[in-house]
Image (cartoon, rainbow, N blue to C red):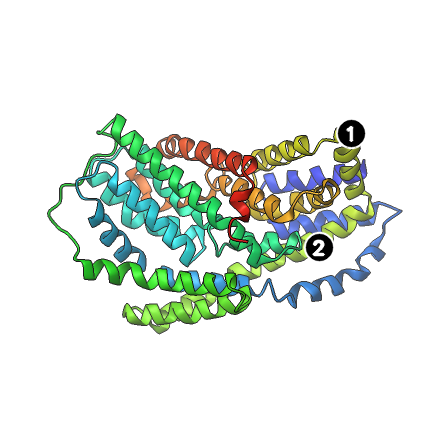
Amino acid sequence: MIALIMFFVTLLLLLIGIPVAFAFGAVAMMFAFFTPDVGFEVFNILPFRIYGIMSNSTLMAVPLFIMMGLILEKSGMAEKLLVSMDSLFKGVRGGLGVSVVLVGAILAASTGIVSASVVMMSVIALPLMLKAGYNKSLASGTIAASGTLGQIIPPSIILIVLGDVMSVSVGELFMGAVLPGLVLVGLYIVYILIRAFINKEDAPALQSEEKSSLKELLFAILPPLFLMVTVLGSIFAGIASPTESAAFGVVGGFILAALNRTLSFSMIKYALFETMKLSGMIFMILIGATAFSLVFNELGGTDLILEFFSEDIGDVWVFIGVAMLSIFMLGFFIDFIEISFIIVPILVPVMHAFGIDPIWFAVLIALNLQASFLTPPFGLSLFFLKGAAKDTITTMQIYKGVIPFILLQLVALALVILFPDLVFAFI
């Protein structure tokens, strides 16, 4: 009972805006101090756990992939990609929306950073879509959804975090997420084309006479594709670990920036400082979550959850349904990082008890967590888009625009549940 109170107190602190790491740490210390059966002695093992986190070779990939994404963000690659891809769809209703989705997918596979992708697409694509006469809700929904593809298409930061939390191979997680990610991209494209066919005023065809040459198109698309194939291919082929591939990705990002003539000291400084801030935030949350889990487990929280699902419910599909619904509902209010470090560790023992494949379950969680970036009122992609778009579109237009894409994400989730081979196709 005390463990459940501890869990809900933590959720309450997160909902009122207390920083995640401090919420975890404060709750852990408070319940350790006021619970006689626990005491501060439970933290004796914490330094060893922290050392394990900081020396974890898998987690070393996180700052490297973040830095790769930040370098590519400032390289001007996205703008060239969109302009060149746009020329492929001249005269096609919904073509610009399709090109935004495809560029979002390429950026996701190149950077894996949602904030960078959404802001870039907002600044570059939104004016083009509105100038072309696109419905504002459709334009904002397409950009927000395309920018969040970095959550499921490797290399994804959340897949690395889930790999560590669930003790599964990050390389296999990357391979398992490829086809579900492509399915989601396909669903987005089909929806845009169908909507454009039904109502041509929502997504009119572009009639501009400007057209990129084949050479310009290849030079815009091939470099990021080459980097993506090299980084992910080396992992899939077993040539390099995710951390080694991430290091190569950073070098590749510098090379692409140099070829694009955007490499500068200010860019390097920006990438280093932002990487340090983002990585520091993630590792602080990890340390706070470790302290939380020590006290939570000491209070019997994990055993309580395991008993509830395995004995009171006792059905694997009910467990999967409850787990997915809980993650989806929590995504309306708290960030994917908090869900990864609070909810997922509680579900892992139950997953093992039911004999569920951890790779498949992790991909389900990643697909579900992707929706948390779009669900109002606290979807981060909505904030990024509104911040970049300013007064061009209203908040309600953004909310209205993302609803169909949230439903498409749930369709993709259902498809992966019904057809598990989508995850194991490349493993």
> Residue 144: which quarter of the image?
top left
Q: Is residue 257 left or right of residue 43?
A: left
Q: Which residue is mark 2?
A: 290
Q: Residue at x 68, y 52 (%)?
A: 289
Category of crowding for the residue at label 2, using alpha-carbon neighbours closer than 10 angstroms: few (below 14), some (14–19), many (at least 20): many
Question: Which mark is on residue 35?
Answer: none
Q: Position of residue 232 (x, y in %)?
A: 47, 61
> Residue 227: which quarter of the image?
bottom left
Q: Secondary structure at mark 1?
A: helix
Q: Position of residue 84 (x, y in %)?
A: 23, 54
| Residue 306 visible somewhere in the drawing | yes
- The N terminus sits in image quarter: top right
Q: Residue at x 64, y 48 (%)?
A: 358
Tell me how far mark 2 sits from mark 1, CA to CA.
28 Å
Category of crowding for the residue at label 1, using alpha-carbon neighbours closer than 10 angstroms: few (below 14), some (14–19), many (at least 20): few
Q: Label 2 is placed on what type of residue? A: Thr
From this viewpoint, which residue is outermost toward the top?
A: 198
Q: Which residue is mark 1?
A: 312
Q: Position of residue 201 (x, y in %)?
A: 22, 29
